[in-house]
Amino acid sequence: MSKTYFKPEDLKKFGKIGDFGAPDLAKKFFEYYGEVFKEGALTEREKSLIALAVAHTVQCPYCIDAYAVDCLQKGADEDMMSEAVHVAAAIKSGATLVNSVMMINKAQEISM
Amino acid sequence: MATSTKSLKAQGNQLADTLIQLKVLNGKELVDAKFPLFAEKLSDIGLKPLKPTGIDIFQINMGKMCNQVCAHCHVDAGPDRKEIMTRETLERCLEILAETDIKTVDLTGGAPEMNPNFFWFVEEVSKLGKHIIDRCNLTIILANKKYHILPEFLAKHKVEVVSSLPYYNAKKTDSQRGDGVFEKSIKALQMLNEVGYGKDNPDLQLNLVYNPSGAFLPGNQASLEADFKRQLKRKYDIVFNNLFAITNLPISRFLDYLLESGNYEGYMQQLVEAFNPIAAHNVMCRNTISIGWDGYLYDCDFNQMLELKVAAKGQHINDFNVDELVNRNIILNQHCYGCTAGAGSSCGGEVV
């Protein structure tokens, strides 16, 4: 085992996880993954920006690496990418704060 | 990316020496990164030796002088470059064009319009009935009063205009092409639209070139084109015909950027991994001949900038021999990965 958990070069090994085990599941996953990111009702760039935002919320360094490059390749600029991450940040902080309603309810319930 | 006001040559940068560039690309200088040989890749798919399919495009580098100093320029062009094609060489080009059935004359530079014989040469090529392409950097139209007539002049001779615009905002465009370039480019595009370019008239084609502002590959050409069309129309009421997505090749100033920014190895790896055999079959050097400012002949503009002359006895325009040239072996090196990555890349954009 290496002394660090995350190594940038490991990203390139992602497509080969099926070589280790469960090849049929890996194959199905990558087929699905490929289909998801094809142009549909959303453009490829919109999907890439969503992926970038989600990558930040799940704090996946591999995904952030991959989708920062992918967004640029698909013609996104710095403002688009930053706004996408702010959307993720707003939802994440909002999700924390909206739960304060439960705190308020409980506090009010037991307070005089 | 950040622009300089001087060419690599004027800076005394060692990469101005094409032998150093070739050594870098082969892991023998500055870096020790080695990649599979491009020639072997072609061998693996039965495409070596790479042979021409003909000569459809006669691409002339009219000189390395330019009013811009773009950060990615493979020509290392700029105001400090004095190499300009002479009238004598241009006359020889005209003789060849008159004698052959080559259909397209592609004028490039530097800024080709800065060659003092540009207007005369376009008129003469136009008389021969050839299709002419002017690779116009846009800002030249506004650079000096004598160039303000360019839109009308080019329209009169039905010259196809191909112009670089790396993005539809100033930040990305100026970081690659220099401060203030975006604003002037927009004004120039509006002037071209005013004389009818980019609209319904098929004789007045206005095509834009997108190339990435950094160490990454271009995305899908059709998607980028749709995006550029929507944004340029919405923001500036500009229309154009096609967008060509071009990959930056790892030579000259872009190679310097890759090395300075620590992106060289990763970028080369991207190019190698994206090798597309279908793109390899359609590379532009198979139907193009590239003429340097001094009359020497090359397989493409990139081989020209690496001083890799055609593998033929007649290597100069004075010894131009069509039969020999269409049977030559095209010179390959590691930079060729740039034309075969993904959907491929040529002076006309994707090739698959």
Image: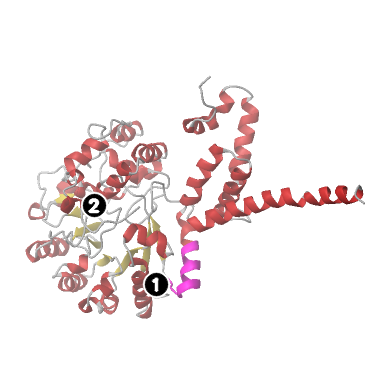
Position of residue B334 relative to residue A71, above or below, is above
Q: Secondary structure at mark 1?
A: loop
Residue A24: x and y in percent read 64, 28
Residue B74: x and y in percent read 26, 51
Q: Is residue B242 magenta?
A: no
Residue B323: x and y in percent read 16, 49
Pointer 2: what residue?
A: B301
Q: Nearer the viewer, residue A42 or B142?
A: B142
Q: Residues within 10 Å of mark 2 (few under 14, many from 20)?
A: many
Q: Secondary structure at mark 2?
A: helix
Position of residue B352 relative to residue B193, above or below, is above
Start-end of magenta stretch: B227-239
Dot 2: chain letter:
B
Q: Is residue B229 magenta?
A: yes
Q: Nearer the viewer, residue A86 or B151?
A: A86
Q: Quadrant of residue B15?
A: top left
Please state which amino acid type lies under the numbered disc 2.
Asp
Q: Is residue A87 left or right of residue B301?
A: right
Q: Is residue B77 left or right of residue A31?
A: left
Residue B351: x and y in percent read 38, 51
- Identified at 28% across, 75% down, the residue is B142
Dot 1: chain letter:
B
Closer to the chain start, of discs 1 and 2, is 1
Q: Is residue B325 left or right of residue A89?
A: left
Please state which amino acid type lies under the numbered disc 1.
Gly
